[in-house]
Image (spheres, grey):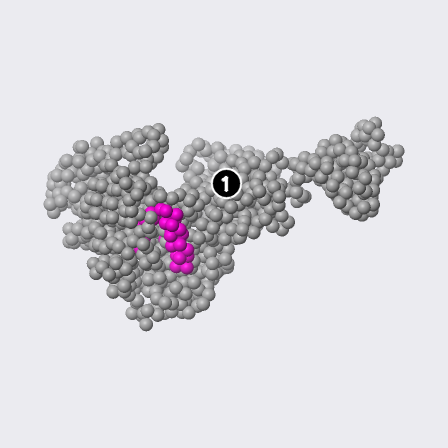
Amino acid sequence: MVLSSSAGFMEQIRIRGARTHNLKNVNLDLPRHKLIVITGLSGSGKSSLAFDTLYAEGQRRYVESLSAYARQFLQLMEKPDVDLIEGLSPAISIEQKATSHNPRSTVGTVTEIHDYLRLLYARVGTPYCPDHEIPLEAQSVSQMVDAALALPEETRLMILAPVVANRKGEHAELFDEMQAQGFVRFRVRSGGGAANEGAAKIYEVDSLPKLKKNDKHTIDVVVDRLKVRPDMKQRLAESFETALRLADGRAIALEMDTDREHLFSSKFACPICSYSLQELEPRLFSFNNPMGACPECDGLGQITFFDPKRVVAHPSLSLAAGAVKGWDRRNQFYFQMLQSLAAFYDFDIDTAFEDLPEKIRKILLYGSGKQTIPFSYINERGRTTIREHVFEGIIPNLERRYRETDSAAVREELAKYQNNQPCPSCDGTRLRREARFVRVGQGDYARAIFEVSSWPLRDALGYFDGLTLDGAKREIADKVIKEIVARLTFLNNVGLDYLSLERSAETLSGGEAQRIRLASQIGSGLTGVMYVLDEPSIGLHQRDNDRLIGTLKHLRDLGNSVIVVEHDEDMIRTADYVVDMGPGAGEHGGMIVAEGTPKQVQANGDSLTGQYLVGKRTIEYPDERISPDPQRMLRIVDAHGNNLKHVDLDLPVGLLTCITGVSGSGKSTLINDTLYNAVARHLYGSATEPAPHESIEGLEHFDKVINVDQSPIGRTPRSNPATYTGLFTPIRELFAGVPASKERGYDPGRFSFNVKGGRCESCQGDGVLKVEMHFLPDVYVPCDVCHGKRYNRETLEVQYKGRNISEVLDMTVEHAYEFFSAVPVVARKLKTLLDVGLGYIRLGQSATTLSGGEAQRVKLSLELSKRDTGRTLYILDEPTTGLHFHDIALLLEVIHRLRDQGNTVVIIEHNLDVIKTADWVIDLGPEGGAGGGQIIAQGTPEQVAKTKASFTGKYLAPLLKRKK
């Protein structure tokens, strides 16, 4: 394949004969340096075209220009099945994958803003003394003289050398030595040096009192006494030099009439306590470097501790009945210790733990201190021995066992009793003390690096926009501040103004991580690149959509081709060029249904997207909304986790409720971290701690809670929809029940590709063999023994209705539903996969190839296939991710069916088509981050649309008007 010599001047990207995955010999010409949106049904081949063909080939060609040595460090994608691609540029993909699972990774480090901040603070930061809040500034003698001469003329000054600071002793030798050097006056303060413990007095050497040996004293040598006059410059310089020599770089100028002191230091040190700092370096401000990291938490900002609430899992039970797991009657050794404690401290071992006196609870958890206790132990032979020793305490016992064990299983078990809390040494800032007391800015504007990092990005941008520095500092800092402001501006423009630089990268959603990478790319200022993005609008409120679209246009205007896989209506309408894939999904898709400008696509009668854009098809409004019953409410009282501001939430039972609000307004904290965790703990005894709240009421209405999120359904290629939904078990049982299996004695395990017996041992049931190519991407070739069928010949000879197990796994859900229509247990599960719009996926398709939206719908179908009690709480987090308008209509049918069966459905969603069909809407805001965390509006969609303070209402109102 040769890249055309005119590629650099080509105005188009030409694709001929693309057959990657389900693409059907696609021929396509895309304009370069334009914003192109690829849309279509879920599973129609959008990602196959954008990522697996265009990006994969763009990346491959660029990487092949590198040396073999460089190539071995790069992860390469599989070579796409395509006849010809011309006009490609080097490609960069920005996908929805979480940025990092490293707890040391933050928004600041990912965007490199933290690197610029470290440089800024190292070069123009002013260190302060942590105890006295005095700037540490090394001053020259001439600066000290100028400061003294700046005082009013004729001011009486005394120049002092602080030789002893708060030290015990008689100090007779010091006085003798100073007297030998000609100094005859001293200022002495006794009794610890505090202002109220004895005033400082000036003594002539002859009248010096004898100092008490065990008291602390502060002693200053009087170097000179003079009046401030311009002709005193030389004398002042000599006096300061003498004082600095005597007091190791420190001097004091005392105004004799007012007792006001001026402190000076020729070193980078505090003039009062001599606290000093080595030269400032960027690594001092890095929590990933030992020089800057807090020594207590190693720069993580958190420490792990054994939580008494987890250790005493059942405080309503007695110690004997199992208040503390492992310390009840069943564990003889520990229980004997508790019995001896009960006898010694006179408490009842059968009293509920929570009813025991506070002092006894403290001794049980943390030990008896130095108090020895006679412990009575009975051995296997029934003999009693008494040993006297201190009681270690349950928590110190767990800490010791955790520290000393080499067993991963024991550590894992003990970790269940642990929790995290902000590090008390650094207050969660991750930095050592020295770094926390370096500030940039003047007066009230001076801020430390951890303060700036904790602010929302919009506030951080405002700070650096208004930051002014003087003289040389301004020249040094200008370039660095310019870079910081540029990067913060891009992050704000993609709707992430509510995040902070200290926010851990592992807590970011896929959409947030993608937009951070997008902002970083704009910051890099590259031109002539092909960017491929996967649904950048995920998790973004309509309000922030315009800013995101503006950002993508800016990326295009820099001279790049921007290709976006997207379903958002605003994004499609604003694109320069639209490609609509279809007509169906899976094997029914893979073709170009329409292409051209948005208007050309709308005019194309074959385009499903076009029909929705012009209004020929719409997502229907419900015929009627169900009104909430005030007597049937699920109520959370005083939720105050993260940015929630003491919220009281009332969720109507048996209704479909949408939780809306701008990004970062607190939706996930309220629903996932508070509601789900609290209900799961109540119903299932879940160990996950809910976010802080006062109480939860109305739990009697539920017997089940199901959280359908977008995490992968399996992280290995062996996991697939059939195994995840439980379909594979009845299918294997069907195969084990046919006569041929019974004759051979095959059980259901014979038809599993995960265990020995029926699988092909050459490829261990994978169907492919991995060939490592070192400098090229690894190649997966079909197994030459089973030819990709995963099973050995004997297993494949067993057939059900003319098909073997490998052929069944290769069926689409749609085909399998027809094939197994007479088997209710299988058909029911397949029907739910069809209902959520997944008829195109194959039963044996690797879970790793499913998108986040597809994985979420597989989970939803699994829950739908279970027997329904009508008392289930369903929580869905943005279920429309990756869905076309047509797919959303199907999904809403399923969700409304759940509600009609009496279940309660709570959806976190930004999609207005879903919000308009809800019975009840709760809008959080008004802003993201610290500016959010309140309920702004609640009621029917019509009521929320009338609320002026609600951003969701503002965008919902025009949609509801169209209905009328």
* Residue drawn at 24 percent across, 61 percent down: 603
Which of the 4 image quarters holds residue 448?
top right
Q: On the rendered image, what quadrant is the N terminus found in? A: top left
Q: Which amino acid does label 1 sit on?
A: Asp
Question: In the structure shown, which secondary structural element does the residue marked by tag 1 occupy?
Answer: helix
* Residue drawn at 40 percent across, 54 percent down: 550
Percent x, y of residue 660: 40, 60
The residue closer to the viewer here, 365 or 587, is 587
Q: On the rendered image, what quadrant is the C terminus found in? A: bottom left
The residue closer to the viewer here, 392 or 515, is 515
* Residue drawn at 64 percent across, 42 percent down: 128
Residue 653 lies left or right of residue 583; in this view the side is right
Percent x, y of residue 926: 47, 61
Which of the 4 image quarters holds residue 200?
top right
Percent x, y of residue 98: 39, 45
Does 565 appear in magenta? yes
Percent x, y of residue 944: 41, 67
Q: Can residue 243 be seen in this view?
A: no
Q: How crowded is mark 1: few (under 14 residues within 10 Å), some or many (20 or more)?
A: some
The residue closer to the viewer here, 558 or 343, is 558
Magenta span = 538-567
Does 188 appear in magenta? no
* Residue drawn at 62 percent across, 45 percent down: 470
Q: Residue furthest bottom?
A: 964
- Is 439 drawn above or below residue 680 in the view shown? above
Which residue, given by chain and number where applicable, does mark 1 sit on? 115
